[in-house]
Image (tube, grey):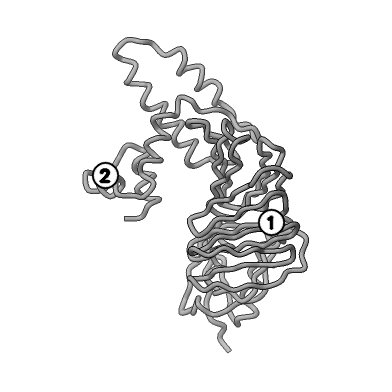
Amino acid sequence: MDKEYLLKKWLADDLTPSEAKAFEALDDYKAHIKILDDAQFFKASEVSEIVGLEEFYEKINSAPTHSDTTIWYKPLLRVAAIVAIILGVGSFFFFDGDANVGSLASEKISVTLPDESAVVLNAKSNIIYNKRDWNEKREVVLDGEAFFKVTNGSTFDVITNAGKVSVLGTQFNVKNRKGYFEVQCFEGLVNVQYNGDAKNLPAGSTFKVVNGVATSDATSDNEPKWINNISDFKSVPFHEVIQEFERQYDVIFSLENINTSRIFTGGFVHTNIEDGLKSITLPLDLEYKIDSKKHITLYKSKL
């Protein structure tokens, strides 16, 4: 069953017995339950303000102690869980000292870590780090894409499900998406650990793994182009371009007889959807139709 569908049904407390079993089988089931259980500790973001959470927190603290408390308490926790899971918007949630920061589609957010290191999250990306133990262990868990400017100090690790990136003080970008892992070093030296091997990546170098195939390349950029609202690609399958476009514009594509394994080199802007669509369709002789604000159809050009 679709994960997003199950999550929405769970948040609405409307799962059927079969759906409940499917939801419990999800890899991140325990994480969702923890959000619900710990929602009473929900705190406002350090980088963006969410209206109404202080009122929610006050209600939790002033809750009656008699047996009827559960009647209203659980729904409020579920509301907080909805905010925590869906809103994101740079919000911080603290569980055992961990700070969890996430961005939505079409959104980029900046985060300052405890040592003044800076992180910029690309659309639909997430980091987790421990504020309490930061001085002893500078470690960030990344899902998605982020640009790091790390202050000098002890080893700084970025952990992904594809590989590990270690530095002392430098500037680099890490992209960790399904079937895609890329590290670009813009300053200093980066150590990339992937599939049991370690590789030193000097400034001006790129290490990329697409569908298990690793390649190295050079870059003349001083920072990732997405920081300036441009996504660029060099010899990647077209489906990677489609997925990034969906993240940047919060849209969904329907593809009619299109080979998404075709190799694409080019890019698109994040500021004008028509310009962006022309940039990714014209090089491949494709056409597009904007069906609605959230839905776009791509199809082959009729010559």
Q: Nearer the viewer, residue 123 or 158?
A: 158
| Picture residue at 36% right of the left edge, 50% below the top | 27
* Element assignment for label 1: strand
Q: Which residue is mark 1?
A: 172
Q: Quadrant of the N terminus?
A: bottom left
How many numbered tags mark residues here?
Answer: 2
Position of residue 227 measured from the top left corner of the image (x, y, whole percent): 71, 55
Label 1 crowd (10 A; few <14 / some 14-19 / many >=20): many
Q: Are marks 1 and 2 in contact (CB under 8 Å)?
A: no
- Residue 52 is tagged as none
Query: What element does badge 2 sit on?
Result: helix
Q: Residue at x 45, y 18 (%)?
A: 60
- In the image, farthest residue toward the bottom: 303
Q: Residue at x 67, y 69 (%)?
A: 267
Give the quadrant of the C terminus: bottom right
Q: CA distance from mark 1 to mark 2?
A: 41 Å
Q: Earlier in the sequence, mark 1 or mark 2?
A: 2
Q: Nearer the viewer, residue 220 or 237?
A: 220
Please name the amino acid that badge 2 sits on. Answer: Ala
Give residue 20's mark: 2
